[in-house]
Image (tube, rainbow, N blue to C red):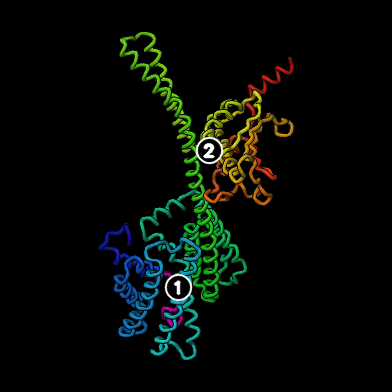
Amino acid sequence: MTASPVPRYLVFPAFIALYLLFDWATYIDPLYGLNITPWNPDPALGLVCWLVYGWRAALPWWIALVLGEVVVRGMPAGLGLTLLLSLWLTVGYGAIGEVLRRVFGNSGVFDSRHRLFQWVLILLVGALLNDVVYMSLLSLAGLIPPGAWAAVVLRFGIGDMVGMLVSMPLLWMLSSAQGRQRLRATVWRYETLGYLALSIGVLYLVFGTIETSEFKHFYFLFLPVLWAATRQGVYGTALMVFVLQLGIGALVKWNNAVNIEVPELQMLDAMLALVGFSIGIVVDEVRQVSNDLKQSLRLAAAGEMAAALAHELNQPLTALSAYGKACEFLVERGEGGEMLKSAIQRMIAESGRAADVVRRLRDFFRTGAMKLEPVEAAQLVSSVSQQFFGALREHGVVLQVDEMPGLAMLADRLQIELVLRNLLANALDAVQERPAGERRITVSAQQLDSKRHGKNSCLQLTVEDSGKGVSAELAARRFEPFVSSKASGMGLGLVLSRAIMEAHGGSLWAEVGDHGIFKLALPLARRVVEGQENYGAA
């Protein structure tokens, strides 16, 4: 099997040995001394081997089937018939394996609900056809009493289907290095010991007196399965249902509990497994979607931050160029002393400033770290507005900036500039739908009442535009991922902006109206608030 921990020349001997072990361990409650039992996990092992090796698994599988009849059951059908029946089972199981191989190839069998249902359907149909032919051969050979055909078909069919449904997922995960690595990463936690311990307790509770058990408390087995499925997805579920099946089989075998309805018990376990796998796959899909969304947000943040980086580095790089030319001029004139030293020191300072900008952005992407500092509202609006002057003139848009109060917000300046830049860019796109002469954007600011917005006072910035505005329906979804009013928009800018605002302890929202209105609020810097209070007291 792929990247097997077993040497290649020992793979098939190891497969045969493990197949015989499964056959012996699950030879429980057989009919007529034949391989007609209510749980057969060994075909699941064979199917996994077939998925990995294709037709090369046929001969080892046939040998394992023959040895199972000889070693485990004493060859009740005789040598010739045993060889023939084992050959049919190899063909029948191999056909199921070949269908699975063609449908799934080497890709994940349990990666989605659709693939899970495909897998279940193939196993059910294949096991039924294989079962009917095999039982018919046994009946024609006189190994099954007349009139018992339907009963043995039911018993053998349940055994195969339950064994494959419950055992194949875990065996498939263990068959590849990637699957083993993911299984180890998923279940190698203290939490796994918790639900395994719970499963042991529940098994004792449900089957403590298994000879007389009527499965009245079987539903308790859902507890560890649901725990594993919701916390560790399909990989945790695969481990859990296999452990439960082993526990149930061991209790039945060691207690010699032949008077209970073992097939009914196995069907209950199969339903338990299917429910667990369905939940586990849904959990994995939700996590994958969440990870994809996070990645999309990071890419969106990278695009937004690139503009911030370009703007922040422009000034120190320009200054470095100017100081460099000044140094060149001074050297050419043969001057040194304090003037040259001062120019060099300023170059060092500007390079340090540029390095600080890059470092802060890098820390933000790695850990979400912020450098909180007082940010003057007027300086913030002026700095961001200047970046839009060219686009405003090109599209004939009037930008009106109301008088800014002399207040400072407590924020990471780079990140808050990103938010304001995003709001102005959206407003610029919105007003372009208006005719020339009616394209206007207004930026204003005001201090919010501290009694209404928490202990600390807040500064609210408002960006209004003469666009068509936000409807009530869109306002409720405007900050959801991938919801955009622009045909070319990804719908991530406002999601990122709101996340930044909330990380700062602030807020960002849109108001319903006949024109665009977006507002953001941030706590004021404490030293500013205290200064105002002292001034009022004086």
Image quadrant containing the N terminus: bottom left
Contact (CB < 8 A) between labels 2 and 1?
no
Expressed as whole percent of the image width and height from the top left, the position of residue 482 reads: 55, 50
Residue with the mark numbered 1: 123
Residue with the mark numbered 2: 394
Image quadrant containing the C terminus: top right
Image quarter for residue 230?
bottom right
Q: Mark 2 vs mark 1: which is more N-terminal?
A: 1
Expressed as whole percent of the image width and height from the top left, the position of residue 434 reads: 62, 44
Count of numbered tags:
2
Q: Going 72% across and 30% down the picture, which residue do you hit?
A: 450
Question: How far apart in space, not on screen, are marks 2 and 1 (Cα)?
Answer: 65 Å
Q: Going 42% across and 88% down the picture, which residue do you hit?
A: 139
Q: Secondary structure at mark 2?
A: helix
Examine the residues drawn in magenta and state their main secondary structure.
Answer: loop
Residue that extends furthest to the left in the rendered view of this protein:
9
Question: Over which residues does the magenta segment extend?
Answer: 31-42
Expressed as whole percent of the image width and height from the top left, the position of residue 378 reads: 61, 26
The magenta stretch spans residue 156? no
